[in-house]
Image (cartoon, rainbow, N blue to C red):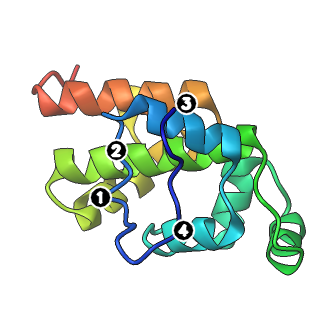
Amino acid sequence: MAKALTLDATLSNSTVDDRDILLLVQTVRAGIKYPLFVKIASQSPFNLSEWSVFLHLSERTIQRYKKEKKTFDPIHSEKILEVTLLYKRGSEVFGSPENFNAWLEAKNVTLGGITPKSLLDTTFGISLLKDELTRIEHGVLA
């Protein structure tokens, strides 16, 4: 069986890769430990308040994970990885994290006038954004 992601000096958004699905499955099943979450979150533009919305956890609960050295449940671990993979993909499509961040924050007519970032709290929303990134990548904007 595949080995789960661990916290080490080489971990970054670039090492979280959707090409090794078994590694992702094992990581989700084992749960993401709080220090790994902090490392992933620090490499994203999202603050703790935004992560709490994405994960459907209160900020206080997330802080308790730190204090109690807890591991995120599989459902939350999966969402952390989904957001991380989407962020990596978006940065590639837009050519830089800064350009992708601007897109995430801008109201989008194609998405009904909402900001793409507001969809990161559901799996369906993340899937919609993945589809939108594919359309952008291929020049299909309508």
Q: Is residue 84 above or below residue 86?
A: below
Q: Earlier in the sequence, mark 3 or mark 2?
A: 2
Density class for disc 1 (Cα within 10 Å; few <14, some 14-19, many ≥20) is few
User: x, y percentage for residue 97?
Assistant: 27, 63
In the figure, residue 131 lies in which quadrant? Answer: top left
Q: Amino acid at mark 2?
A: Asp
Density class for disc 3 (Cα within 10 Å; few <14, some 14-19, many ≥20) is some
Q: Which residue is mark 4?
A: 41
Residue displayed at 73% across by 37% down: 75
Distance of label 1 from label 4 (alpha carbons): 13 Å
In the figure, residue 118 lies in which quadrant? Answer: top right
Q: Amino acid at mark 3?
A: Gly
User: x, y percentage for residue 90?
Assistant: 29, 47
Q: Which residue is mark 3?
A: 125
Q: Earlier in the sequence, mark 3 or mark 4?
A: 4
Q: Nearer the viewer, residue 129 or 8?
A: 8
Q: Earlier in the sequence, mark 3 or mark 1?
A: 1
Res 112 visible? no
Foreground mark, 3 or 2?
2
Q: Amino acid at mark 4?
A: Ala
Q: Nearer the viewer, residue 112 or 99?
A: 99
Q: Is residue 37 above or below residue 39?
A: above
Q: Earlier in the sequence, mark 4 or mark 2?
A: 2
Q: Nearer the viewer, residue 52 or 40?
A: 40
